[in-house]
Image (cartoon, rainbow, N blue to C red):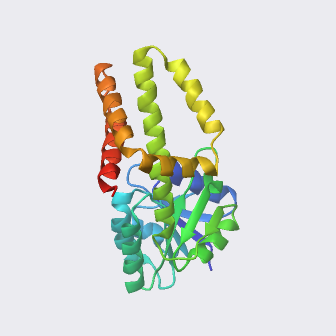
């Protein structure tokens, strides 16, 4: 391998990863139509130009650009080159990328970044799946990357990231909404302390208790969340998460025998 790595996209994640690769001694080429390349990265005029001669192409642009970027770069890529998609795209998009790659002799890896990149850069924890996942992990690992390889096709890494996102981002949104309402009600400090205490004492049994209790008490909790949503509206807070919780509990109640 020549060791040339192409980075497509110099947003927050792409620019930090590219800079870390350069600092670790990698030869890096890149392209972004709006953002200039970080110091040490050879700036190019297109996805295809960046991919010329690269053993590994890192697509770090956006989910909506993921397929277009691969199609644009394909004419410049030699058979056997590796494409790694780091975008937060659906498993279906990752599988589509793998199918496109297979049709052109390009190996595609699905990479999911599992934490914010600022402060971590290339060392952000990542999951990788797909036919070239181990190859990508070895290559980037030599420059300091932290990648766990999953035994499965492209799309598996994305699935695990997004399943976690349903939980974590949903929890975050509920906390933000609850605190906004508590602020309007004049008791935000109390709720902040209560949330922190609940999070601190959580463990595996907490998950089981939540799952079991939600199903068992769906009728009562659905009514409770309807009241909570009404209260938020009275406080001038749009009850997006509270109303979604009401709808979920009502669905579960309707599924009970």
Toward the viewer: 236 or 248?
248
The vertical placement of 252 against 182, above or below, is below
On the rendered structure, is 209 left or right of 226?
A: right
Toward the viewer: 180 or 37?
180
Look at the image and tell me whether residue 38 can be seen: no
Q: Quadrant of residue 89?
A: bottom left
Q: Quadrant of residue 24?
A: bottom right
Residue drawn at point x = 31 percent, y = 46 percent:
250
Q: Residue 94, percent across and down?
A: 41, 69
The vertical placement of 42 against 130, above or below, is above
Farthest top residue?
A: 186
On the rendered structure, is 98 left or right of 124?
A: left
Toward the viewer: 152 or 64?
152
Q: Residue 34, percent across and down?
A: 39, 49
Q: Residue 115, percent across and down?
A: 57, 50
Q: Quadrant of residue 66?
A: bottom left
């Amino acid at each position: 391998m020549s060791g040339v790595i192409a980075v497509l996209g110099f947003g927050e994640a792409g620019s930090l990863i590219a800079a870390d690769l350069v600092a670790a001694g990698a030869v890096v080429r890149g392209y972004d139509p709006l953002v200039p390349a970080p110091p040490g990265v050879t700036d190019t005029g297109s996805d295809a130009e960046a991919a010329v001669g690269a053993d590994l192409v890192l697509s770090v642009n956006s989910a909506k650009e993921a397929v277009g970027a691969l199609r644009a770069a394909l004419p410049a890529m030699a058979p056997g080159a590796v494409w790694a998609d780091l975008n937060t795209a659906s498993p279906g998009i990752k599988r589509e990328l793998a199918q496109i790659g297979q049709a052109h002799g390009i190996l595609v890896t699905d990479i999911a970044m599992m934490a914010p990149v600022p402060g971590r850069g290339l060392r952000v924890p990542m999951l990788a799946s797909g036919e070239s996942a181990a190859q990508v992990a070895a290559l980037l690992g030599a420059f300091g990357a932290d990648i766990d390889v999953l035994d499965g096709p492209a799309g598996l890494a994305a699935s695990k990231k997004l399943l976690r996102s349903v939980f974590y981002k949903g929890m975050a949104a509920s906390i933000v909404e609850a605190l906004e309402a508590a602020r309007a009600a004049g008791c935000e400090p109390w709720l902040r302390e209560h949330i922190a205490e609940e999070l601190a004492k959580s463990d595996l049994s907490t998950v089981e208790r939540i799952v079991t209790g939600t199903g068992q008490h769906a009728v009562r909790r659905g009514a409770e969340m309807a009241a909570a949503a009404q209260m938020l509206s009275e406080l001038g807070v749009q009850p997006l998460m509270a109303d979604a919780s009401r709808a979920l509990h009502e669905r579960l109640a309707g599924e009970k025998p």
